[in-house]
C-alpha cells in the first residue's frame, strides 16, 4: 500500500472569489491572492491566502507548508511504519510512554471527544477498522465472522485499553493500537493555519482532503463560502452553502467509502459499541467548531451517533452541527436536513 495517511473524504465544494486563476487574482493595489496546492496524507491539500503585504511568494509558502506536513506525517501516520504513532502501536510495553507535544495535543483532544460522545469517538478501533477492510492493513473487504468482531472488540475500547495524560500514553493491554484517521487530517489543517498566521496572513482557507479551516475573509471581503455536498455517491451536487470565518469545518459521510456484499451496504463508519458499521439513516454530518481537529473528530462521532442522539449532544454542548438523513419513506432518493440550534444561529 502507498504511504497514505488516510482515505480522503471530500464532502464539500469551495466557492471562492476570482474562480479563474486564483493565484493571479488581485485585490486592488494593496493585496494579492496566493494559491498553494499539493499532496499529503494520502490526499490533496489546497490553500488560498490573501497577502496584504504582497511580499510573499507561493513557492516560499509551499516549502514551509510541505515541511510542516512531513512532520505531521512523521508523528501521526498509521501508514508510515517509522512514525511516532506506528512505533507506539508496534510496542507491547504497558509502561507510560512520553510523546511529542503534537501527539499529546491530538490525543488529549481525542479523549475529550471520546468522553463527550458517549464513547463513540474511539481511536482504538484499529482492529475493527482493519477487520472490516477499511484500515491501513491490506485486507480483503468482506463481512467478518461474528467471532472475529467480538475478538476485535476485546482489543478495542479507548477508556478501557488506553490511559491518556497531558504528555504521555500508556497501554492497558499490550495489543492496544491507536488509529488517527478521524482526527489527524484536521490537526494537519490546524498546523498549516498556524504556519500561515506566523507569516502574518490573517485571511486564508486551508483544506486537506475535506477538512478545513478559514480565517478572516475571502478575496471578496466576505466570509468564505463552502458548499456541503449532497450525500449521494452518484450526484456531485451542492446541498447547502455555509459562510465561514475563523472556524474549522469537517463533513463525514457514509456514502463514498463502503462495500456491498449479498445486497447489504457496509459503511466505513464503525459503531464502537457493536463493532459493526452504522445502520441508521444519517448519511452525512457537518460540524463547525473552533478548529479543524475538533471538527474532524466530532464529524465522525456525530455520524456514528446519528441524528437523534447526536442532535441532543450537539445542542447540550452548543455545537454547530448539520445532519443530513436519507428519507426512508420516500419512493426515490430524498434527504432531510436537520441543523442544531447553534448551526441555525450561525447561518442566520
Image: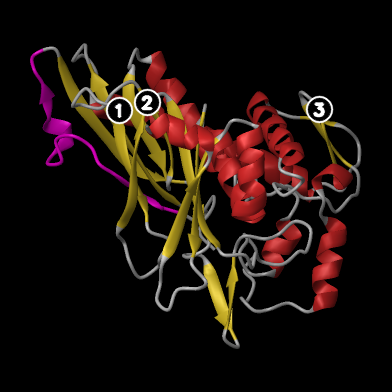
Task: For label 1, count other residues whose C-alpha is less than 10 Å away and answer few (under 14), some (14-19) or many (20+).
Answer: some
Q: Are marks 2 and 1 in contact (CB under 8 Å)?
A: yes
Instruction: Give the residues in magenta.
Output: 9-29
Q: Earlier in the sequence, mark 1 or mark 3?
A: 3
37 displayed left or right of 134:
left
Task: For label 3, count other residues whose C-alpha is less than 10 Å away and answer few (under 14), some (14-19) or many (20+).
Answer: some
- Figure disc tally: 3
**Magenta-drawn stretch contains 214:** no
90 displayed left or right of 194:
right
Residue pointed to by mark 3: 165
> Which image quarter holds the N terminus?
bottom right
Rendering coords of residue 14 (x, y %) = 29, 43
Residue pointed to by mark 1: 223
Q: Earlier in the sequence, mark 3 or mark 2?
A: 3
Q: Earlier in the sequence, mark 2 or mark 1?
A: 1
Cα–Cα span, label 2 and label 1: 5 Å
The colour style of the image is secondary structure
At 78% from the left edge and 79% from the top edge, which residue is drawn? Answer: 145
Q: Which mark is residue 245?
A: 2
Amino acid at each position: 500500500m502507498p504511504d497514505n495517511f488516510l482515505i480522503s473524504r471530500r464532502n464539500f465544494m469551495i466557492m471562492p472569489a476570482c474562480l479563474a486563476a486564483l493565484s493571479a487574482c488581485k485585490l486592488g493595489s494593496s493585496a494579492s491572492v496566493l494559491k498553494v496546492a499539493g499532496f499529503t496524507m494520502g490526499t490533496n491539500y489546497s490553500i488560498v491566502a490573501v497577502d496584504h503585504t504582497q511580499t510573499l511568494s507561493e513557492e516560499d509558502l509551499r516549502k514551509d507548508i510541505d515541511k510542516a506536513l512531513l512532520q505531521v506525517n512523521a508523528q501521526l501516520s498509521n501508514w508510515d511504519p517509522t512514525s511516532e504513532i506506528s512505533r507506539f502501536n508496534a510496542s507491547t510495553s504497558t509502561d507510560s510512554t512520553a510523546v511529542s507535544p503534537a501527539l499529546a495535543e491530538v490525543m488529549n483532544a481525542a479523549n475529550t471527544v471520546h468522553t463527550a460522545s458517549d464513547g463513540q469517538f474511539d481511536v482504538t478501533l484499529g482492529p475493527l477498522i482493519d477487520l472490516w477492510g477499511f484500515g491501513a492493513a491490506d485486507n480483503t473487504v468482506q463481512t467478518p465472522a461474528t467471532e472475529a468482531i467480538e475478538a476485535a472488540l476485546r482489543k478495542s475500547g479507548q477508556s478501557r485499553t488506553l490511559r491518556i495524560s497531558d504528555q504521555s500514553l500508556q497501554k492497558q493491554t499490550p495489543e492496544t493500537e491507536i488509529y488517527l484517521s478521524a482526527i489527524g487530517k484536521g490537526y494537519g489543517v490546524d498546523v498549516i493555519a498556524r504556519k500561515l498566521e506566523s507569516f502574518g496572513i490573517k485571511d486564508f482557507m486551508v483544506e486537506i482532503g475535506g477538512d478545513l479551516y478559514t480565517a478572516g475573509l475571502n478575496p471578496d471581503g466576505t466570509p468564505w463560502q463552502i458548499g456541503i455536498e449532497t450525500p449521494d455517491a452518484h450526484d456531485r451536487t451542492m446541498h447547502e452553502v455555509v459562510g465561514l470565518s475563523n472556524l474549522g469545518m469537517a463533513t463525514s459521510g457514509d456514502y463514498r467509502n463502503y462495500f456491498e456484499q449479498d445486497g447489504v451496504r457496509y459503511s466505513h463508519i464503525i459503531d464502537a459499541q457493536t463493532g459493526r458499521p452504522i445502520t441508521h439513516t444519517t448519511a452525512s454530518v457537518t460540524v463547525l467548531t473552533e478548529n479543524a481537529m475538533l471538527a474532524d473528530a466530532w464529524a465522525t462521532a456525530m455520524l456514528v451517533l446519528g441524528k437523534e442522539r447526536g442532535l441532543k449532544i450537539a445542542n447540550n454542548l452548543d455545537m454547530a452541527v448539520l445532519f443530513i438523513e436519507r428519507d426512508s419513506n420516500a419512493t426515490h432518493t430524498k434527504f432531510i436536513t436537520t441543523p442544531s440550534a447553534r448551526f441555525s444561529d450561525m447561518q442566520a
